[in-house]
């Protein structure tokens, strides 16, 4: 490799920074791929998974993934894949892929702390005094609003590395790209390599390199965006569009309930038209759909533009857990049986089915408010980390339903694979006289059950 070259596409070293729901499956996929899917050429890459969490690194080294992203698997037997919490190990890496969280703060504004810290780490690592490498490429996958990569992250790296960004001379420089993650936790069909990857780079040569890099191991192929900002914007509107569509059916659901019309029946009828997109009402949480629109509205406010529709959609979806509590209280008030205390069974506490992630879970918020109403809550969720649930609401989840207990309120929140045995009959077995049942999964159908 000459000093004017970019890294060798097939023989480079790669650091994946952040080993959560995005970074771990990405690192694993790159490491397992030993032959280019486009050219068939042999690949000999070294992949290092880096995370600040020492416990996380120790667990992964021993084949344990608490997030259950890939199941318990001896990751260390994958040739060319290693894990570390020591940044010194990354000093002579060619490619950095940043997959750290980009959450919102308590004011629902973007919290860029993690991506800024990752940029600082990379900036120090690629400094000439720390590394013998030149022309390293930094690829961001974290979801951000348009401009974060070039206006915030790159200046941090440029300042700390003392290297020129995007130099045409390809000497003492570094380059960047943005390729948004498209991970869908809990989805066994739409896996990371089965979803087309959007790519982009800081100049044409780098953009082509990054596109070829992802093409070498993404079966679904790639789409090369015209610029980094275009790729950033494409990612942010994917989830914003879905958020707005769900907000529409949520608002319709509230309206139809007042009109005494079954929302599911309405949707089934409307879906007979070829161009009707059928969305189901529900609780929108997690670290994507429930967060990304706030990044876009923040950027809009920054330039003096008011995003009325996007903001309204977020307001509706953020309200749904409160609406559900209102419906619970309403049904209690109309019940003919009075219980001294409500015994509530909640089936599923994560933000979506078959996923252990409880971040921004609307069900978790609902349970918090029910606890304030002095209700006795039993949470059953076989896929979440009970300790993480306890840290949030001071109440632990359990893996299976206590058979000896009956409940006055049952909330079937998530249709995890482990809940296949939940049927109308099973709910009846767990019920007291006039137990109130809320089925948010649309799996059960009984005239006495409540659906959104």
Image (tube, rainbow, N blue to C red):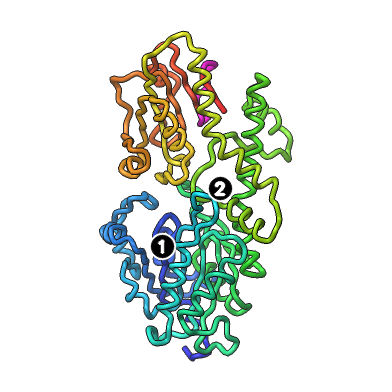
Asked which secondary structure carries label 2, the reply is: loop
Q: Nearer the viewer, residue 13 or 136?
A: 136
Q: Which residues are magenta?
A: 440-448
The picture places residue 93, in percent across and down from the top left corner, at 40, 77
Tell me the SS state at disc 1.
loop
- Side (left or right) of 227 relative to 149: right
Q: Position of residue 366 (x, y in %)?
A: 46, 33
Q: Residue at x 57, y 81 (%)?
A: 166
Q: Is residue 298 above or below residue 400?
A: below
> Is residue 293 left or right of 43 when viewed as pictured?
right
332 or 238, nearer to the observer: 332
Residue 179 image point, x, y percent: 55, 65
- Magenta run includes residue 446: yes
* Circle on res. 289: 2
Report the residue marked by disc 1: 18
Q: Residue at x 54, y 56 (%)?
A: 110
The picture places residue 162, in percent across and down from the top left corner, at 48, 84
């Amino acid at each position: 490799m000459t000093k004017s070259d970019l890294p060798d596409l097939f023989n480079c070293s790669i650091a994946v920074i952040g080993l959560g729901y995005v970074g771990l499956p990405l690192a694993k996929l790159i490491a397992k791929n030993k032959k280019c899917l486009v050219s068939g050429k042999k690949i000999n890459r070294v992949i290092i998974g880096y995370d600040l969490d020492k416990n996380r690194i120790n667990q992964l080294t021993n084949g344990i993934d608490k997030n259950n992203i890939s199941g318990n698997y001896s990751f260390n037997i994958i040739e060319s894949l290693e894990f570390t919490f020591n940044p010194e190990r990354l000093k002579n890496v060619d490619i950095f892929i940043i997959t750290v969280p980009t959450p919102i703060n308590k004011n629902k504004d973007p919290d860029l702390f993690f991506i800024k810290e990752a940029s600082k780490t990379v900036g120090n690592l690629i400094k000439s005094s720390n590394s013998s490498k030149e022309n390293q490429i930094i690829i961001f996958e974290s979801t951000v609003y348009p401009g974060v990569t070039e206006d915030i992250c790159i200046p941090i790296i440029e300042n700390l590395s003392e290297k020129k960004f995007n130099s045409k001379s390809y000497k003492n420089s570094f380059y960047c790209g943005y390729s948004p993650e498209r991970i869908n936790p809990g989805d066994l069909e739409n896996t990371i390599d089965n979803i087309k990857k959007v790519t982009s780079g800081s100049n044409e040569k780098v953009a082509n390199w990054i596109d070829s890099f992802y093409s070498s191991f993404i079966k679904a192929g790639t789409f090369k965006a015209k610029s980094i900002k275009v790729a950033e914007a494409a990612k942010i509107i994917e989830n914003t569009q879905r958020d707005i569509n769900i907000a529409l059916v949520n608002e319709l659901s509230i309206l139809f309930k007042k009109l005494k019309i079954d929302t599911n029946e309405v949707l089934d009828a409307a879906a007979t038209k070829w161009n009707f997109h059928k969305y189901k009402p529900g609780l929108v949480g997690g670290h994507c759909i429930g967060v990304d629109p706030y990044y876009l509205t923040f950027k809009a406010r920054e330039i003096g533009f008011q995003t009325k529709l996007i903001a309204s959609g977020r307001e509706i979806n953020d309200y749904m857990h409160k609406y559900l509590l209102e419906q619970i209280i309403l049904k209690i008030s109309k019940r003919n049986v009075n219980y001294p205390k409500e015994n509530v069974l909640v089936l599923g506490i994560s933000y979506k089915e078959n996923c252990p992630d409880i971040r921004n879970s609307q069900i978790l918020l609902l349970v918090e408010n029910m606890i304030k109403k002095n209700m006795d809550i039993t949470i059953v969720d076989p896929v979440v980390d009970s300790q993480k649930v306890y840290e949030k609401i001071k109440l632990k989840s359990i893996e299976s339903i206590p058979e000896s207990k009956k409940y006055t309120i049952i909330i079937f929140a998530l249709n995890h694979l482990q809940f296949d045995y939940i049927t109308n009959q099973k709910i009846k077995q767990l019920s007291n006289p006039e137990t109130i049942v809320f089925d948010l999964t649309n799996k059960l159908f009984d005239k006495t059950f409540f659906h959104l």
